[in-house]
Structure formats: structure tokens, C-alpha cells
């Protein structure tokens, strides 16, 4: 099982009471966010993930804990989860194996050259940068780690057929317009990925990858 869902933040938080929807620890964390936008993103991620857990495995209740390294953990044995948000979009993944997901909405006018260099992006182009960034951050999440530019820079990847891939990247669009967001999922057997989204895949941008780089440590569940 390897499931991914992408949705709008607004659709996930509409008519949702944070006090009722979140656990005590989650509510305390939600309350510490200063901006309304960040609170909405946090709540949307938790709601989307709980909906997926409830629909797929009947385990939508209970806290979604954060481990010291930043990995998410749920109480159901044998399940791994991951959440990402950018702008007004949120993504969540549920799997029976370690998984990491990352999405990025391009920001017009952003200077990407320094960031591209910091993560070892091959060119200064926007598409290459966002593909590289999402790929490497998804891997960090799969490994149960937070943002680590040094490890991201050292991590390599080469194209490979879907059957042998452990990461997938793509861009998604709305109504045939230019890419709205970039997405990456890192997991063994990523060719089995099942996706639910109101966005359309830009098929020509779908790529499968084999990671090159040592796993820093065994990944904990969550």
C-alpha cells in the first residue's frame, strides 16, 4: 500500500474546529504558530491524513505524533505517514513502508541560484530546482530527518525504470495551465503509487529515480 492525496488547504479545513479536531499536543503546537496561514496549513495536513487513515485502514482517530528527528508517527503498527504543504496546497502519504512526500508551489521572482547550489541542483532553471528540492526533501522525510542541506547536497539520484525506483517526481497542473506545484514521493516500490488529486499530472514531467547515497541511519516508524 502506497497512497498519496493532494488537496487544497481550504477544502481540508472548512468548518473544522481545531480544538475538536486536534489532540492536546497537536492543538498546543497549532496554537504556537503566529500566522493564520501556517495554522491553516498545519490543520489541513492533519485533517487530510486522518481522512486517509480512516478511509483506508479504519484508523483515523488518535494523535499524530512528531518524533525528535521530525518524522510523523501514528499508533497503528506497520504504517508510515508523511505530510507536506506549500501555499494553498497540502499533500499526505500513507504507506506500509517508510515514505516521504514533499510539494512546492513556485514563487515568482524568487532567486533560486543560491538555493540550487546549496542542494546540488544541476542547473539554475526553475523546473530543475523544484524537482531536485522536492526529491531530496522527500528523501529526508523518508529517512525520518529534518531539513539538512549538507545531506541533501551529497545525495544523488539517477533515472531508472518504475519497477526499480525508490523515488518519483512530477509537476501537477490545473486546467492545463503551467505547473502549479512540484511533487516528490520517496519510498521503496514507488511504482505502486496510487494518487488522488483534483490536479492533473503533467505526464511528460513524471520521472522515476534510484537514490545514490548512504542511508544515514535506520528510519523509525511514522
Image: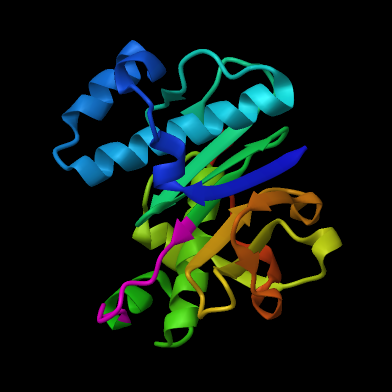
In this rendering, the answer to whether 182 lies above or below 3 is: below
Residue 106 colored in magenta in the image: yes
Q: Magenta residues, as a range?
A: 103-112
Residue 8 colored in magenta in the image: no
Residue 146 horizontal side relative to residue 167, left or right: left
Question: Which is more toward the observer, 83 or 151?
Answer: 83
Number of marks in the rendered image: 0
The quarter of the image holding the C terminus is top right
**Residue at x 64% of width, y 66% of height:** 200
Question: Which is more toward the observer, 35 or 149?
Answer: 35
Residue 185 horizontal side relative to residue 28, left or right: right
In this rendering, the answer to whether 203 lies above or below 23 is: below
Its colouring scheme is: rainbow
**Residue at x 64% of width, y 17% of height:** 59
In this rendering, the answer to whether 195 lies above or below 160 is: above
* Horizontal and vertical percent position of residue 175: 57, 72
The quarter of the image holding the N terminus is top right
* Horizontal and vertical percent position of residue 23: 38, 14
Q: Is residue 70 visible?
A: no
Q: Is residue 147 visible?
A: yes
Residue 219 horizontal side relative to residue 109, left or right: right
Q: Hey, which residue is sitting farthest left in the picture?
A: 34
**Residue at x 77% of width, y 71% of height:** 160
Identify the main secondary structure in magenta. Answer: loop
* Horizontal and vertical percent position of residue 73: 51, 25
Q: Hey, which residue is sitting farthest front in the picture?
A: 15
Question: Which is more toward the observer, 145 or 175?
Answer: 175
Amino acid at each position: 500500500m502506497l497512497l498519496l492525496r493532494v488537496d487544497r488547504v481550504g477544502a481540508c479545513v472548512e468548518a473544522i474546529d481545531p480544538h475538536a479536531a486536534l489532540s492536546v499536543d497537536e492543538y498546543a503546537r497549532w496554537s504556537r504558530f503566529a500566522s493564520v496561514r501556517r495554522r491553516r496549513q498545519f490543520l489541513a495536513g492533519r485533517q487530510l491524513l486522518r481522512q486517509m487513515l480512516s478511509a483506508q485502514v479504519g484508523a483515523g482517530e488518535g494523535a499524530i505524533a512528531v518524533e525528535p528527528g521530525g518524522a510523523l508517527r501514528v499508533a497503528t503498527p506497520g504504517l508510515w505517514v508523511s505530510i507536506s504543504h506549500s501555499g494553498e496546497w497540502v499533500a499526505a502519504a500513507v504507506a506500509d513502508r517508510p515514505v516521504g512526500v514533499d510539494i512546492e508551489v513556485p514563487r515568482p521572482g524568487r532567486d533560486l541560484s543560491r538555493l540550487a547550489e546549496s542542494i546540488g541542483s544541476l542547473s539554475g532553471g526553475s523546473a530543475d530546482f523544484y524537482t531536485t528540492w522536492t526529491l531530496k526533501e522527500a528523501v529526508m522525510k523518508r529517512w525520518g530527518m529534518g531539513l539538512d542541506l549538507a545531506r541533501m547536497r551529497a545525495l544523488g539520484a539517477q533515472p531508472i525504470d518504475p519497477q526499480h525506483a525508490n523515488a518519483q517526481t512530477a509537476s501537477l497542473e490545473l486546467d492545463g495551465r503551467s505547473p502549479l506545484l512540484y511533487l516528490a514521493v520517496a519510498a521503496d516500490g514507488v511504482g505502486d503509487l496510487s494518487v488522488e488529486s483534483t490536479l492533473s499530472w503533467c505526464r511528460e514531467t513524471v520521472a522515476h529515480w534510484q537514490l545514490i547515497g548512504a542511508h544515514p541511519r535506520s528510519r523509525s516508524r511514522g
